Amino acid sequence: MTESATTSFLAAARAAQLARLVEWLRIPSISALPAHKQDVRAAAAWLAAELTRIGLEHVEVIDSPIHPLVYADWLHAGPDRPTVLIYGHFDVQPVDPPEKWTTPPFEPTVRGDDLFARGAADDKGQTYVHVAALEALLATTGKLPVNVKFIAEGEEEFGGATINAYVPAHPDKLAADVCVISDTHMLSPTQPSILYGLRGMWSGEVTVTGAAHDLHSGSFGGAIHNANQALAELLAALHNPDGSVAVPGFYDDVRPLAAAERAALAQVPYGEAELLHESGAPAAWGEAGYTIVERIGARPTLEINGMWGGFTGEGFKTVIPGEARAKLSCRLVPDQNPARIGAAIAAYLQAIAPPTVRVALREYHSGPAFLSPIDDPAMQAAARAYARVFGAKPVFTREGGSIPVAAVIQQTLGIPIIFMGFGLGDDNLHAPNEKFHLPNFYRGIETVIAFFDELR
Ligand code: BES
Ligand code: ZN
């Protein structure tokens, strides 16, 4: 009876719940850009007010020198019921390049079945799935079937230093039986997937300095090592022709894939065709000897995220740049240690740097990979919830993205983490025209409710 009341509530509340998500998405909470610091704060305040409105308790915005956290709970389900820690993030990536957006990133727009906005899927939309589920349950039954603790951060896309320190410092406050995170995607709108692994991360920036300043390429060209060229030569030496990473020691700690796991991953219905469709690339690329799913989820990489130097404006300038830079990042797998990887990259760059330039490496954030057992009862409860709502059993797979706090929660709270993603591979995360598939939004809400039901 109450289930049908909740179902009718959700049917009637669709437009209103979407409108509230749209309101949240209008706040340009870009955590990486200092100019948007107040917007990240505004997104936190909006969430805190929303959690208060739906009936959560102990709602607080926890300030930090970087970006705030938001906490709330509802703990009246009874001591015999499990406690679920829900995690999400309300910060978003920069919008670059702005001219590639069909509609402006912070003017959320519905086209067809999709809601377009920065943060639509990553991660305000997926975080709001949980808010909407809690609202429906509290509004129609006056209670929740499980105890709930809710924590969200405004810094995930920026490394998560604040929450990575907060969780180990507040183990009692955050103590729970299971953590659920919706910040990943499923294989297709009809094929749900649950992740049991995410890659870790190391990131840094390399600066190549040649001449003390930019030079006329007629007067100095051919006699000075161009910093752009030297950088390109260094970057080209980071990979081997077979697609593997050339940095000595890079693979030393990599946990090999067991034959049984390779066999299971081979069953995941994602391959070259899906990859090319989602990416628009003309051909696949990667480490020889591994499938696409393994390359993305279970093998480490080294990427060049940006490179610049010299004159890049319109027109032409005959210049030899004195300095060139590149942003680098690695996706890491168990049991790679981010600090060791950073040191190995720094040592390799110094070893191969020619005497004609100086090379410096500064490090940004990093975090280890995440892996969890799939036979955990909570994992199986999530699988049944997906099957109930989507009509298809989820596949268990590993993904390439990183959620830095996951390993921290696993290690310091000692609880399983269930990645109940409702995004899709073509949601354009971090890219122009990010979107959230609205049928997944509504089904996601029902799946969270079914998960609570399966868990108790
Ligand atoms: N939602 C993503 C993580 C993700 C993406 C998981 C794709 C699975 C598939 C998350 O918000 C993210 O992008 N994290 C950053 C973290 C980094 C900046 C420390 C990432 O993975 O680049
Ligand atoms: Zn995210």
Image: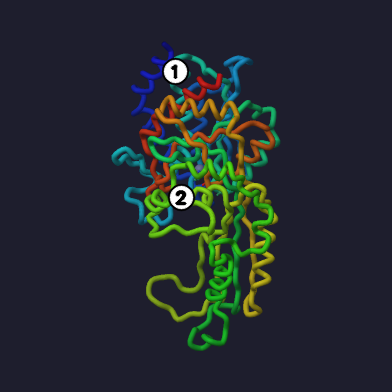
The answer to whether any part of residue 33 appears in the image is no
Could you say where residue 223 lies in the image, as x and y percent from the top left? 56, 87
Could you say where residue 301 lies in the image, as x and y percent from the top left? 57, 56
Residue at 66% across / 37% down in the picture? 166
356 horizontally vs 190: left or right? right
Q: Say above or below: 96 vs 223.
A: above
Q: What secondary structure is found at the residue carrying circle 1?
A: helix
- Asked which quadrant contains residue 317, the reply is bottom left
Circle number at residue 385: none
Q: Which residue is mark 2?
A: 430
Q: Say above or below: 192 vs 28.
A: above
Mark 1 or 2, nearer chain start? 1
Q: What secondary structure is found at the residue carrying circle 2?
A: loop
Residue at 51% across / 65% down in the picture? 307
Q: Say above or below: 453 vs 435.
A: above
Could you say where residue 86 lies in the image, as x and y percent from the top left? 55, 30
Going by the numbered disc 2, the residue's amino acid type is His
Per the model, the C-alpha gap separating discs 1 and 2 is 34 Å
Going by the numbered disc 1, the residue's amino acid type is Ala
Q: Which residue is mark 1?
A: 139
